[in-house]
Amino acid sequence: MSQSGALGCDFFVLLGDDITFESKGWKTEVEDHFMSISESRQLPLGCACVSFRDTTFPVFPTFPVMHRYHLDVFSGFLFPPSFVNQHGDPFLCNPELLGKIAALKTSSNRASVHTLIVVDNPGCGEEALASVEALRDWSPNHLVRVYVQPENMGASLARNAGMAQSFGDWTVLLDDDVIPEPDLLDAYLGAIMRFPEAKIYVGLTKLPEPQSLMQHSVFANPPWGVTANLCVEGRTNNSLWFSSAYPKSGGGEDVDYCLRMKNRIGVGPDRETCIVSVPEAVVHHPFWDNILLQIAGWARGDVQCLSALPHSTFYAPPNWAEFCMLLLMVTWWAGAGLWSSLWRLLVSLVAIVGLEAILNIIPALTRTPPQMDWPSRVVVAVLAIVPAMTQVSHDAMRHI
């Protein structure tokens, strides 16, 4: 970003490498919007952010246009160094999206609803905080409170803060970058009535229709539940909390929470029925700006579960990453004589990784869109195996 300022650019826009402009004259329109905001709000020119309309997900400001005034104010930084949650996700502390969450109710007042918005980034700006504070509501059966953390404490501690202040028997955990379906609470309430012995209810988090090969690769993986949409026991009957040992931006804490719940129940039929899937409880989540970076962050957190929950692990033969590490260490310990055969070592490593990749690509191909041409399907399948191989690599490094 500092380079754009050095080149004398007045405007810059954050774009992905898989987008196509469909609007003609968009540069003039962007400048007109900046001028209009400056005149109507009596602000310096450039003290604003104008966003493109993403046709694949029109309700989210995916591609923001910034003015060099932003860089001048923040000494050349696009995001402050303390902005660690979601890798600079532009949707955090978004009053419009939070308003949709705060508006959730049950039909016919089937349950008392209390919404608590936990702001885990108090440095997001006075204007943003004021907009969130404006969502407070003391209406009957629609209490909305706002709690601001003293500092950015991360996903786990933010959820714990919300659960600790919960008045209800059940707590629905939602991230602030999701759009819930209006009947979300009804779906969870129905599941609680059908499965009263369950402890955790996992909703469905939907992504928009994929457009790029990278986005298609996410759909080529089996679906999984995430804490962006989860219903757990509330304060009145809960003593299990999310662990703060995992990354602030999330990853692993949801798996840890579910496994610890199962371990508390012990052996028996209740262990297998304590977690229930609720596909009718739907929220919509946008794609991440950097999918591989997001997944790599999850992988770093997920492998910590192996150390935190040893009783939920099992012994198995070395996987491909562990075998590669063993091969490297044996070569190192054997002395300098074996380094003359370095090329054999490299060939062996390439063969091991290549074989593992092929074994994973073949099933991934069956989950790619059949209407795609074969080269694109192969690329999607290759990208789809990155999460699993990244997680295994982090696990192997953990043993060093």
Image: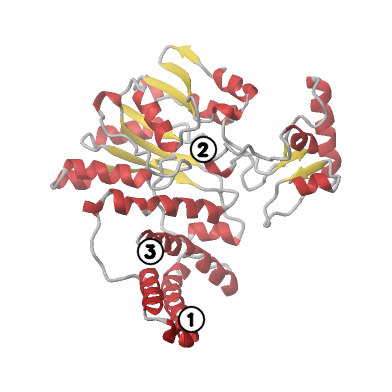
In space, the residues marked 3 and 2 are separated at their CA atoms by 34 Å
Mark 3 vs mark 2: give the one in front: 3
Mark 2 vs mark 1: give the one in front: 1
Q: Earlier in the sequence, mark 2 or mark 1?
A: 2
> On residue 254, which mark appears?
none
Task: Name the residue type under label 3.
Answer: Ala
Task: Name the residue type under label 1.
Answer: Leu
Q: Does residue 369 appear anywhere in the picture?
A: no
Residue hosting label 1: 346
Question: Compared with residue 82, is residue 212 higher up or lower down, i.e. above or below?
Answer: below
16 or 44: nearer the viewer: 44
236 or 390: nearer the viewer: 390
Q: Which of marks 3 and 1 is nearer the N terminus?
A: 1
Residue hosting label 3: 396
In space, the residues marked 3 and 1 are separated at their CA atoms by 18 Å
Question: Compared with residue 343, is residue 297 higher up or lower down, i.e. above or below?
Answer: above
Q: Tell me if label 3 and label 1 are in contact, CB under 8 Å.
A: no
User: Is residue 393 shown left or right of residue 373?
Assistant: left
x 44%, y 34%: residue: 174
Residue 82 screen position, x and y as percent = 57, 36
Q: Does residue 224 appear anywhere in the picture?
A: yes
Q: Tell me if label 2 and label 1 are in contact, CB under 8 Å.
A: no
Residue hosting label 2: 178
Residue 279 screen position, x and y as percent = 38, 44
User: Is residue 378 shown left or right of residue 28?
Assistant: left
User: Is residue 218 shown left or right of residue 264?
Assistant: right
Residue 109 screen position, x and y as percent = 38, 20
Image-quadrant location for residue 261: top left
